[in-house]
Amino acid sequence: MNKESLNICISCERTENIVPLVSITFAQNATWICTQCLPTLIHDPQKLVGKFENMNTDNPPDALN
Ligand SMILES: [Zn+2]
């Protein structure tokens, strides 16, 4: 399975081969979320805000010392 060619859920990072993915956008970033994580986004969006913020950052958290 070539994971790079598959869309993945921004929350649980499962591929579209495993779970149905729904296209969403947030803060002008287009991404995917699976149907199982969608309730999290609806009821507790703060949990996912960090993932969006880290998606296209120039300073990944791991690089911060
Ligand atoms: Zn998910």
Image: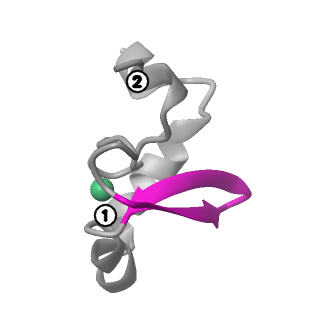
Q: Is residue 27 found inside the magenta-colored segment of the image? A: yes
Q: Position of residue 43 (x, y in %)?
A: 31, 85
Q: Quadrant of ligand 1?
A: bottom left
Q: Position of residue 10 (x, y in %)?
A: 41, 48
- Can you tell which quarter of the image residue 56 is in? top right
Look at the image and tell me in which quarter the C terminus lies. top left
Instruction: Please name the residue that numbered disc 1 is placed on.
Output: 47
Instruction: Please name the residue that numbered disc 2 is placed on.
Output: 3
Residue plotted at (67% across, 61% down)? 27
For label 2, being within 8 Å of ligand 1 is answered no
Q: Position of residue 16 (x, y in %)?
A: 40, 46
Secondary structure type for disc 2 = helix
Measured along the vertical axis of the image, is residue 35 above or below residue 54? below
* Separation (CA) of disc 1 from disc 2: 24 Å
52 vs 50, left or right, is right
1 or 2: mark nearer the eye: 2
Secondary structure type for disc 1 = helix
Q: Which segment did they paint magenta?
A: 20-34
Look at the image and tell me in which quarter the N terminus lies. top left
Most frequent secondary structure within the magenta stretch: strand
32 vs 27, left or right, is left
Q: Which of 46/19 is in front?
A: 19
Q: Amino acid at mark 1?
A: Lys
